[in-house]
Image (cartoon, grey):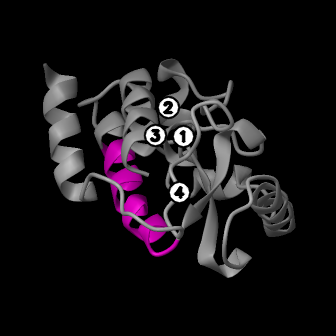
Amino acid sequence: MLALAVGALLLLQWGGGGRAGTSWLLPSATLTPGVTNPDVTQATIHSTICITGWTKTIRPPVDYTNRLKREQMAAWQLPGTPADYQEDHLISLGIGGHPTDPRNLWPEPRPHAEKVDVVERDLRLRVCAGKLTLVAAQQLEVELKHESG
């Protein structure tokens, strides 16, 4: 019940639903299923994700994410230029997503990418406050991104 309530709240915040047109891309459940960071568990959240600035210590270098974004855009035949996308973590670093596994990274269309960051921060705050378990937040984020981008 809690997961449904949180999900409904996040969908309202997120805006829900996709847009029509070639600039819109939903992450593929096959190509981008989401992968977690083995160093982040419910038992380690207060020494990892709940420490302000911790994600900066594990964030992949820009040259890695830019190269991966160009490779994915070519392989997936995406329109536009790399500037039209942000290489984003399906399971965000703030709730224990794997930093470099390509199965957790995808070219998310702008400006939607910036809107999603707000939801990612909210999920992290809920996990760190004990209002949502790590696994529940991760599952919710994967479901929301696969359904709504």
Q: Are marks 3 and 2 in contact (CB under 8 Å)?
A: no
Badge 3 density bin: few <14, some 14–19, many ≥20, Cα 10 Å? some
Say left or right for 60 vs 56.
right
Q: Position of residue 65 (x, y in %)?
A: 78, 61
Say left or right for 42 vs 34.
left
Q: What secondary structure characterizes most of the magenta part?
A: helix
- Sequence-wise, the earlier of marks 3 and 2 is 2
User: Which labelled disc corresponds to residue 146?
Assistant: 3
Amino acid type shown at disc 2: Ile
- Looking at the rendering, the stretch of residues picked out in magenta corresponds to 110-125
Magenta-span inclusion, residue 70: no
Residue 96's place in the image compared with 114, above or below, is above
Identity of the residue drawn at 43% across and 22% down: 135
How far apart in space, not on screen, are marks 1 and 3 (Cα)? Answer: 11 Å
Q: Position of residue 26 (x, y in %)?
A: 50, 50
Magenta-span inclusion, residue 113: yes
- Position of the N terminus, as image quadrant, is top left
User: Which labelled disc corresponds to residue 25?
Assistant: 4
